[in-house]
Amino acid sequence: MKKSNLVSVIIATYNREKMLEQAIDSVLAQTYTNFELIIIDDGSRGGPKSHLQNHCDSRIKYFFQQNKGESGARNSGISQATGDFIIFVDDDDCLCDYALELAVKTINENDNYDILYSDSIIFDENNRSYGLSSGRQLPSGDLYRDLVLKYITIVPSGMFFKKNCFDQCLYNEKIKAGTDTEFNIRLSENYLFQFIDKPLVKFRNYMRSREKTIRAKVFGDRINIDIRYQTIINSSKYNSLSLKDKIDITARHLGNVGLCCVTNKKRIKALCYYICSFILYPRIIILPLMVKAIIPDHWIPFIKNVIKNEIFKPGGLKGNFK
């Protein structure tokens, strides 16, 4: 392992002071010690945190800025980084203590790859672990097709980069939520990914209500959806895809627009987009979305209750279909 390899660890944070402390502790506990920890406070309430500005560990560099969103905060961290490598850690996640040591060793042993990613250990708000997010071997190499067809999803937390990756590619600050997929697709234009089968990060998974809120932010903004689609079809690698793949991508985009319409209470428009998506590329998953688009929200609990108590209860209607 080359001691000269400085790693820039970037944590972008916003109003998560308690969880941030846990993320910081996980970085300071690394077995590989040649790192700088760059914390970008994206306008958290209460203003700059003096205990971070004057932290006793000189490797910590704290910056406070007016709120720019997650993309702007990560880009600010990149601009401050002086390391040979960069790794992101979300402010509510934690690095495994061996993460930097393993990543530096792996990327130095195989210079063909530019970006490392791994599975992640799932844990909740009470720090209880639930196993791995994927639990399977994921691909390495050119990941463009895997990413655009949603065969894999790579979260930014724990991704490990050669710094020169950011000479051509930064996060798109027009996207206010769910920036990761679009960013990774642009990365796949020029860079190769390597999967590490040992998790580098512990990823915090929230209760369903929080997940629903995040999903609404991602799919509630048509700009987010359109930028992601334009990134895919404007790629130099798009023409190498089969016609079937291109139809699949367009159908997925129409389905996402439909979801955006539902989120914004435009149900008739949503139904039209879902129907177009289904005609292009029939998927079973679209059918319940089509039904939900035309059913009032206050009917949903009643319908779920009927399905649960009348169809799937012991001796219920389900038995008639055997």
Image: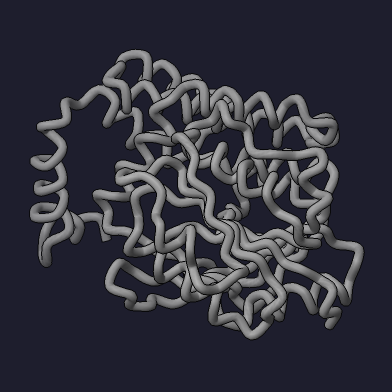
Q: How is the image coloured?
A: one colour
| Image coords of residue 7 (percent x, y) | 72, 66
Please, is residue 195 above or below residue 145 in the view?
A: below
Query: Residue at image x 16%, y 37%?
Result: 300
Query: Residue at image x 38%, y 71%?
Result: 123
Please, is residue 273 above or below residue 45 in the view?
A: above
Please, is residue 293 above or below residue 135 in the view?
A: above
The reply to whether residue 132 is visible in this rendering is no
Task: Locate residue 94 relative to residue 180 in the image: left or right.
Answer: left
Task: Locate residue 202 relative to residue 107 in the image: left or right.
Answer: left
Task: Locate residue 178 relative to residue 208 in the image: left or right.
Answer: right
| Image coords of residue 265 (percent x, y) | 27, 20
Please, is residue 19 above or below residue 267 in the view?
A: below
The reply to whether residue 45 is visible in this rendering is yes
| Image coords of residue 136 (percent x, y) | 60, 72
Q: Out of 89 and 257, give the one closest to the viewer.
A: 89
Q: Out of 283 and 139, give the one closest to the viewer.
A: 139
